[in-house]
Amino acid sequence: NAGVTQTPKFQVLKTGQSMTLQCAQDMNHEYMSWYRQDPGMGLRLIHYSVGAGITDQGEVPNGYNVSRSTTEDFPLRLLSAAPSQTSVYFCASSYSNHEQYFGPGTRLTVT
Amino acid sequence: GENVEQHPSTLSVQEGDSAVIKCTYSDSASNYFPWYKQELGKRPQLIIDIRSNVGEKKDQRIAVTLNKTAKHFSLHITETQPEDSAVYFCAARRALNFGKGTSLLVTP
């Protein structure tokens, strides 16, 4: 099992550019989530999904889109990058009400 | 949505002492309460969890206690070691909402 994988590991964007952060899991988990981690702010939930075709907003959804067309994949799209989106992004997956398994993270810098 | 408050934000202890981190939550429907440890530059990983049908769970030097009436749960680390130094997070509401984290420093 690869667990939860994320690509890329590092990314630098210019303000206004768009990009997609990829996340995949091979554990057949129904839940998948995206978090951003900023110093002193903990892990803030951006979007989550409870199954293929179902997504919902978390605490900080503005500026991000998600879709869940398959159980395995949960990409996060930045539509028009802003410096405030500079952060470390973690994808996670789990069964409902069970341990979340985190990916290795993507460090994003927006200049 | 669920509001998870975690205290303290930083904690410094001497090696061998105990450390206690507390979290409160707002959603009375929450029934699963995990704790994660995140070492510098790494991903969070589960260290212990508890469900609402028990009040306490232990795993060697770590324990978690839960008070559902008061809506709070705590992480207890005994006989702390330098390798316990990390950021610790609690979570609630289907384990999706996290506290802001506690940076624990264990000094030799």
Image (cartoon, rainbow, N blue to C red):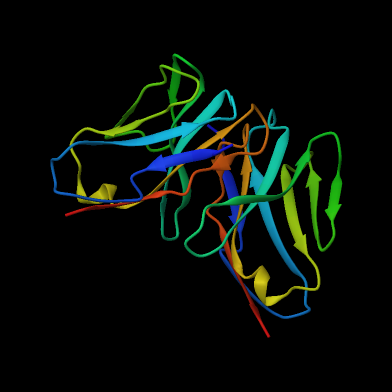
Q: How many marks?
A: 0
The image position of residue B77, as x and y in percent, is 76, 64
Which quadrant: the C terminus of chain B?
A: bottom right
Q: Residue at x 59, y 66 (%)?
A: B86
Q: Most extreme residue toward the bottom, as rendered?
A: B108
Q: Most extreme residue toward the front, as rendered?
A: A1
Q: Quadrant of residue B32?
A: top right
The image position of residue A64, as x and y in percent, is 30, 33
Above or below for B63 versus A6: below
The image position of residue B42, as x and y in percent, is 51, 58
Q: Residue at x 28, y 47 (%)?
A: A85
The image position of residue A97, as x and y in percent, is 67, 30
Q: Is residue A95 left or right of residue A78?
A: right
Q: Is residue B59 left or right of residue A17?
A: right
* Residue A35 in view, yes or no: yes
Above or below for A37 versus B81: above
Q: Quadrant of residue A63?
A: top left
Q: Residue at x 61, y 51 (%)?
A: B45
Q: Most extreme residue toward the top, as rendered?
A: A53
Above or below for B23 versus B28: below
Q: Is residue B7 left or right of residue A71?
A: right
* Residue B3 in view, yes or no: no
Nearer to us in this view, B1 or A23: A23
Nearer to us in this view, B3 or B75: B75
Q: Is residue A19 left or right of residue A6?
A: left
Q: Residue at x 61, y 63 (%)?
A: B8
Nearer to us in this view, A47 or A69: A69
